[in-house]
Amino acid sequence: MTHDFQTLVATLAGTNTRARFSGGSWSGDAFRAEIQKLSEALIASGRRRIASRLDNGPHWLALDLALRSLGLVHVPLPTFFSAEQVAHALAASGADLLVVPVGTKLTEAMAELPVVAMTDPFLAVALPAHVVSIPADTAVITFTSGTTGTPKGVCLDATALMSVAQSLADAAAPLGPKRHLCLMPLSTLLENIGGVYAALLAGAEIVVPSLAELGYSGAAGLDVAKLLARLHADQPESMILVPQLLLALVMAAEQGAPLPHSFKFIAVGGARVGGNLIARAKAQGLPIYEGYGLSECASVVCLNQPGAERAGSVGRPLSHAQVTIIDGEVVVQGVGMLGYLGEPERQNGPITTGDLGYVDADGFVHITGRRKNLFITSFGRNVSPEWVESELHQHPAIAQAVVFGEARPFNVAVLWPRDPNCSDQDLADALAAANRGLPDYARVQQFVRAEQPFTFADGLLTSNGRPRRERIHARYEIALTATNGASE
C-alpha cells in the first residue's frame, strides 16, 4: 500500500495506545490532536524551514509528523551537537525557526530574537532571515556526522522517507512486532525512519523515553543497568541498535543479566558489526538482523530478514534499492538524496557510497570497509581497518581500537581498555587473543595505550561513534612512530 504522511497521520485514529512515554501514553486520537495543535501553531507562524533540538519524547514525534503532514522542512539537530555545530547547521540550512524545550538557556544572541507562539512544552525562536537555496521538494535536512567537526547537510524528499519506511515495515512484517522502543536519538535518520515511520506504518506502538531514562550521558556514555531496567519495564518487540549498544547488551547477558523475552526483531547497523558479535548475540537468544545504509540513500539499503539471512552479510537490498559493485565499490540505485546543502542539486542516478564490498551469488551484500580508509602495508597487502577493529572489539577487554598500517611492515593500534585499571600486559594478552582470529597480514603486532577514551567531545569520534582517524593519529603520532621498529 502506498502512503503519504497525511494518510499516515490519519491512520492514527482510534483509542488504542500509539505512543508511550514516562508519565503517560497517547491514544491514536490524542496523538492526532497533538499533531493538529502543532500544525495550527506552525501555520500561524508563517515559517517553512523549522529546526529542532529536542530530547527523545512524544512531542518530538508530534512535531515531526506535523511538519511532514504540512509539507514543511524539518532540520532535526542532535542534542549532542556543540554550539558551533548548531550555529553551522542553522546557517547552512537557512532555518527560519528553532524549536527547543521550554526552559532552554539560549545564547545571548538568541535571547534577543523574537519568540513565536508554540504549544507546550516548546519554545520557538524566530531566526534572522537569510536566503539559502535548497531543492524544491526537500522534506528533511539531516546532518551527517562526517569525519570533521563540520556536519554535512543531506536533503531528502518525503517520497524517499516513506519508501524506505515502507520497505522496513514489510521486512519486519513476518514477525509482526507491535511495540518499538526508540533507543537512538530521534534526530538520527535511522531511528526517525526505521523506528517511527516504519512502526507507524505497521500499526505498532512507539515507546519514547528520554535519552537519560535509557542510561545515556552525553554522546557516548551508557549506564547499562539503567538500560536493562528500561528494557524490562517496556518489554519492546523491536529495537534498532548500533554495534556498541549491541555489545553492551551481549556482555551483560553473558555475565548473567537477564534480558526480556519480548524481542522479535532487533536491527543492528550504523557501523561495521563483527560476525563474532552477531553469533554471540544469537547465542543469547537475541533476534538480530544486520543491515546497511547511509543518509545519502535515505538510511537503510540492505537488511537481513526473517527467512533471508546470511552470516557475515548485511542482507539483500530492500525493495526500494538496487546494489551493484563497480571497481570494488558499493553503488546504490533507487531512492537517493536530492543533494548536499551548498552544492548543486543531484541528478537522478546511482550513488557511489565509498564503501568497499561484494555481492555473493545469492544476492547478499557484504561490506568490507571504506575506500578512503583502506591502507596498503609495506608488503603490498590491502587492509580495511574497520574489519580488523571489529574483530578487536569482540574481546571483552578492548573497548576502543583504531588500527593503522599504511606503508608499515606490520599493523599497529591505539587501544583503550574497557576497564581503565586493566594492565598493559592484560591488554597485550587481549590483543594476542583477538589476533588469533585474523590472518597474519591483518594482525596488530604492537599497540599504543590511549590516554583516555575517544569521545565526540574531544573531537576524536564522529557524532555516531566512528573514529576520526587523522585526529587520533595526530594525537598519538609520537608514540605510533616509536612502534616502527621490529615487530614482536
Image (spheres, rainbow, N blue to C red):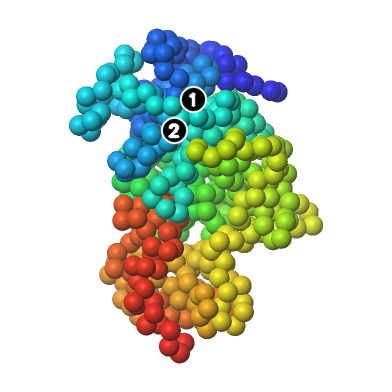
Instruction: Name the residue carrying label 2.
Output: 93
Task: In this rendered view, identify the residue nearer to me: 202 or 115.
Answer: 115
Dot in front, 1 or 2: 2
Query: Quick check: 418 above or below 209?
Result: below
**Lateral position of residue 367 relative to residue 430, left or right:** right
* Alpha carbons under labels 1 and 2: distance apart: 10 Å
Q: Earlier in the sequence, mark 1 or mark 2?
A: 1
The crowd level at tag 2 (other Cα within 10 Å; few <14, some 14-19, many 20+) is many
Q: Quadrant of residue 447?
A: bottom left
Q: How many marks?
A: 2
Assign a secondary structure to mark 2: helix
Q: Which mark is residue 280?
A: none
Residue 104, horizontal then vertical, whole percent:
25, 29
Task: In this rendered view, identify the residue nearer to me: 279 or 427.
Answer: 427
Instruction: Name the residue carrying label 1.
Output: 73
Residue sitting at x 35%, y 80% = 425
